[in-house]
Image (cartoon, rainbow, N blue to C red):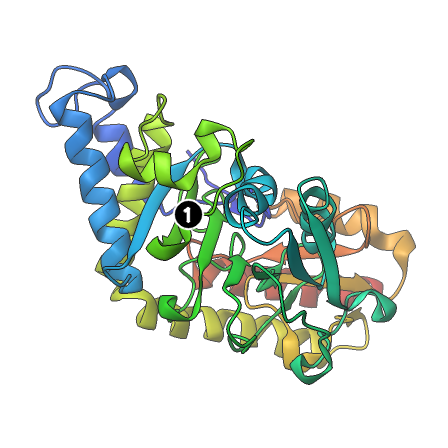
C-alpha cells in the first residue's frame, strides 16, 4: 500500500495512527464482539466511547465548567441556521463579519431567522485581508457577533480573538479547530465540522456557554436545539456514532502529540516553510496579506495559468493529491491541517521547486 499526501480541504487527511487503530478495532471493539458501527448508541460500550471523546476534547481546549460540549449532525452549514435559531430568541438582530465564502453563506442563512447585519466585510479586497476590528460597525443590540476565524477557500485567518464587547462572540472554527490553543471563555459559541482537523465528515462539535441555552426561537428544530441536545447528551436522536468514535481517537492522538501547544508549533513550522518558499519564488504567488495568512489553507497561483493542468497532473503522479484551488478563486490550494506530516510539506516544496525549474 502506498499512501499519498492528501492536501484536500475536507474531508481531509487523518493521522495514520488513528486509521490503524480504527482498522484494528473494526470488527471487534475491545472484545465487545462487534464493530462500533454496529453498536446501539444507548449501550454502555458506545456511551463510554462518547464520554471519553467528550472528556478528551474538554481537556484539549480547557473548556470551562459553565460550557456544554455537543456532538451534532448537519455540518457547520447546519449551524449557520442553528446559531440564529438558538440565540435570536430574545433579540432578532445579529452582527456578521464576512471574510470569505463561508462567512457569506453564514450571513445569508441567518437572514432567514432574523436581521443579520453586515458589520464588516473583506470582499472589496477580494477577501485577501481582514478589516481592522476598529472599523467594524457593531450593533448595540446584537444577540451575538459571528465570524469565521479561518476561511478555507481564501486562506485568511485571524491571528487573535477579536474583542467585540459584551455581545457573545460566535465562531465557525471548522478549518482551524484544534490547530492551536483557544481561550474558550472569550466565546459564546464555537462550532466546527470535524472533517478537517478533528475526524471524518458527518459530525460537528458545538461548544456553548450555558447561559445561552435558554434563548432558542420557538421554531428551532429539536435536533438543532442546544439545550435539548445538552440535556440528552447529544443523543436526542441517533448520533453519528462512528464519526464520534474516530473523533475520540483523533483527540487521543492530539494529546499524544503534546496537546494544542505542541501541534501549534508544528503547524507554524509547516506553514512558514511553504510561505517562505512561495515568497522567494518568481513563479508562485500567494495573494493574501501576510499579516493574516492561514496556517491551515495555503492558496497559491502559478505565473502562467496555462500550466495549471500540467502542474496538477504531475503533482498527482508524484503522490501529491487534491491541490486544485476552489473554483471561485482558481489556482492551487494546499490544506496542511494537523494530520499533514511535515514530510508532506517538504515533498510539496521539492515538487514545486522542480516544476518551476522545468517550466519557469
Q: Nearer the viewer, residue 248 or 216?
A: 216
Residue at left offset 19%, top offset 40%: 51
| Above/below status of 100 relative to 9 | below
Residue 68, how many percent across, how many down? 31, 50
Q: Secondary structure at mark 1?
A: strand
Residue at left offset 46%, top offset 61%: 343
| Above/below status of 39 relative to 58 | above
Q: Is residue 186 left or right of residue 138?
A: left
Residue at left offset 75%, top offset 77%: 281
| Above/below status of 187 relative to 49 | below
Hey, which residue is sitting farthest left in the picture? 31
Q: Quadrant of residue 178?
A: bottom left
**Residue, disc 1:** 206
| Above/below status of 88 relative to 273 | above
Residue 50, how many percent across, how many down? 23, 36
The answer, for residue 192, to whether it is visible in the render is yes
Answer few, some or many: residues within 10 Å of disc 1's Cα (few below 14, many 20 plus, some between 14 and 19): many
Q: Quadrant of residue 249?
A: top left
Task: Tally the marks.
Answer: 1
Residue 90, how many percent across, how many down? 54, 51
Q: Is residue 326 left or right of residue 11?
A: right
Residue 185, how many percent across, how many down? 36, 69
Q: Quadrant of residue 271?
A: bottom right
Q: Quadrant of the C terminus?
A: bottom right
Q: Nearer the viewer, residue 281 or 186?
A: 186
Q: Nearer the viewer, residue 352 or 184?
A: 184
Q: Is residue 358 left or right of residue 166?
A: right
Q: Quadrant of the N terminus?
A: top left
Amino acid at each position: 500500500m502506498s499512501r499519498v499526501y492528501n492536501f484536500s480541504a475536507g474531508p481531509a487527511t487523518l493521522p495514520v495512527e488513528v486509521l490503524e487503530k480504527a482498522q484494528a478495532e473494526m470488527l471487534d471493539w475491545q472484545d465487545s464482539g462487534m464493530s462500533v458501527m454496529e453498536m446501539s448508541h444507548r449501550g454502555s460500550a458506545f456511551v463510554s466511547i462518547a464520554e471519553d471523546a467528550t472528556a478528551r476534547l474538554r481537556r484539549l481546549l480547557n473548556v470551562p465548567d459553565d460550557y456544554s460540549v455537543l456532538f451534532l449532525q448537519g455540518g457547520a452549514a447546519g449551524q449557520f441556521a442553528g446559531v440564529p435559531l438558538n440565540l435570536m430568541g430574545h433579540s432578532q438582530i445579529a452582527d456578521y463579519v464576512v471574510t470569505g465564502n463561508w462567512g457569506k453563506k453564514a450571513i445569508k442563512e441567518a437572514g432567514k431567522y432574523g436581521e443579520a447585519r453586515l458589520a464588516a466585510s473583506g470582499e472589496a479586497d477580494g477577501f485577501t485581508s481582514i478589516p481592522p476590528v476598529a472599523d467594524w460597525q457593531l450593533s448595540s443590540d446584537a444577540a451575538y457577533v459571528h465570524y469565521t476565524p479561518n476561511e478555507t477557500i481564501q486562506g485568511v485567518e485571524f491571528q487573535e480573538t477579536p474583542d467585540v464587547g459584551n455581545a457573545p462572540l460566535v465562531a465557525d472554527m471548522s478549518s482551524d479547530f484544534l490547530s492551536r490553543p483557544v481561550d474558550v471563555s472569550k466565546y459564546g459559541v464555537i462550532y466546527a465540522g470535524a472533517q478537517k482537523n478533528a475526524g471524518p465528515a458527518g459530525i460537528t462539535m458545538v461548544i456553548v456557554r450555558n447561559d445561552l441555552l435558554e434563548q432558542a426561537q420557538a421554531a428551532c428544530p429539536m435536533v438543532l436545539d442546544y439545550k435539548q441536545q445538552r440535556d440528552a447528551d447529544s443523543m436526542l436522536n441517533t448520533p453519528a456514532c462512528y464519526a464520534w468514535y474516530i473523533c475520540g481517537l483523533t483527540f487521543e492522538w492530539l494529546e499524544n502529540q503534546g496537546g494544542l501547544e505542541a501541534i501549534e508549533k508544528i503547524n507554524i513550522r509547516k506553514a512558514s516553510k511553504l510561505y517562505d518558499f512561495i515568497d522567494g519564488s518568481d513563479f508562485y504567488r500567494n495573494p493574501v496579506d501576510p499579516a493574516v495568512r492561514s496556517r491551515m489553507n495555503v492558496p497559491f497561483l502559478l505565473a502562467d495559468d496555462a500550466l495549471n493542468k500540467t502542474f496538477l497532473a504531475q503533482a498527482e503522479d508524484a503522490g501529491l493529491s487534491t491541490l486544485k484551488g476552489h473554483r471561485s478563486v482558481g489556482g492551487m490550494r494546499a490544506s496542511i491541517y494537523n494530520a499533514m506530516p511535515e514530510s508532506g510539506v517538504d515533498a510539496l516544496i521539492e515538487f514545486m521547486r522542480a516544476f518551476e525549474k522545468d517550466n519557469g
